[in-house]
Structures are given as structure tokens and as C-alpha cells.
Image: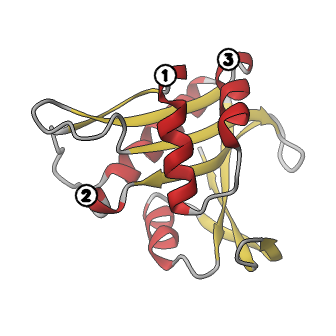
Amino acid sequence: MKEPLDARFYIAPMLESDLAAVVELERLARLSRWGYDGYRTELLHNPLAVMLVVRGQSPFLRRSIYGFLAGRVQLSARHDGRELHIANIAVYPEVQRQGLGRRLLREALYTGRLYGATTAFLEVRQSNHGAQALYASLGFVTTAHKRNFYTDPPEDGLLMELTL
């Protein structure tokens, strides 16, 4: 299924000037906490970081960003070669279900391939059925159940993987 491209938004590399907005959305979405310094360190010091944001086009611009994805390509402990770890992804509630998360993921997967990754993985809350459906629609499959993986609130997680 191919959704129509929403020209009001575009995917761009994350900039240091985006970090305050990224941390705000991280808090709102109750993601695993990286915090300002964590994102900044990854952005400025990891050449294999995959750090993306969703920006809005004028005259639609009300926020500096509408979503973000943070990940990295790393050596795999489970597979030969490199893997893309998608650590955090979020989109503001008012623009959810408009294909922005899918666009962030597709761009991250493309970038991961360019950086030499042969697999991609992420963790997702067991109760987050919407995200699980999105990931499955892109080809991710559940490969493990991680008991008590999340805190605040405590919850099991699912490990999902994709061969690139």
C-alpha cells in the first residue's frame, strides 16, 4: 500500500538546533530517555548515527519539528556485519496516522543500507499495537519477547527485526 506523499512535511537530517524540540517530543511520547546530552553526543560524535526529523513547509509550520527518529548503525552481536538499531521514533499526536512515521522509517532504512547495515532492529512496547502494525507493514518480524524491558511504566517489550 502506498500512501500519497503529504507535501506539507519533509524528512531532514537532525541538527543540533533541533535537540530541545526532540527532547520535548521524547518526554511527551514517553520514550526511552536519551535526553539532550545523549542526542547531542550521538549527533556530533557518531559518524554512523541515523538522526532524522520531520519538518513542516510554510505556511503550515507551527512547530520546528513534527517528529524524529534516532538510531545508529553498529557492529552486530547477533548477525554478521552491521545492523541498524532504531532506538527512538515519535511523531506528534496531531500529525499521527499521516504516514510520517513510515517516511522516517523508510529514510532510516535507506540510510542504514548506505552505512552498510544488513539488518535493522527495534524494540516496541507490547501494548503499542499501532507501532507494531506499522513495523510489520515494512517487513519487520517479531523475534523475541523481552520481559520487563520498559520502565515508567513497567512493560514487556518485543524485539522486531528486518533483513535489509
How far separated are the C-alphas under marks 2 and 1?
A: 25 Å
How far separated are the C-alphas under marks 2 and 3?
A: 30 Å
* Image coordinates for residue 75, horizontal then vertical, percent: 83, 34
- List the residue tagged with mark 3: 44
* Dot 1 amino acid type: Ser
* Dot 3 amino acid type: Leu
Measured along the vertical axis of the image, is residue 29 above or below residue 104?
below
In the rendered structure, which disc, 2 or 3, sits on the residue that comes first in sequence? 3
Circles 2 and 3 in contact, beta carbons < 8 Å:
no
Local secondary structure at mark 3:
helix
Q: Residues within 10 Å of mark 3 (few under 14, many from 20)?
A: few
Local secondary structure at mark 2:
loop
Q: Residue at x 77, y 71 (%)?
A: 151
Measured along the vertical axis of the image, is residue 45 above or below residue 98?
above
* Image coordinates for residue 119, horizontal then vertical, percent: 67, 45
Circles 2 and 1 in contact, beta carbons < 8 Å:
no
Q: Residue at x 59, y 63 (%)?
A: 30
In the rendered structure, which disc, 2 or 1, sits on the residue that comes first in sequence? 1
- Of badges 1 and 3, the one in the foreground is 1
- List the residue tagged with mark 1: 17
Which of these two is toward me, 70 or 16?
Answer: 16
Q: Residues within 10 Å of mark 2 (few under 14, many from 20)?
A: some
* Image coordinates for residue 140, horizontal then vertical, percent: 57, 61
- List the residue tagged with mark 2: 98
How far separated are the C-alphas under marks 1 and 3?
A: 12 Å
* Dot 2 amino acid type: Gln
How many numbered markers are drawn? Answer: 3
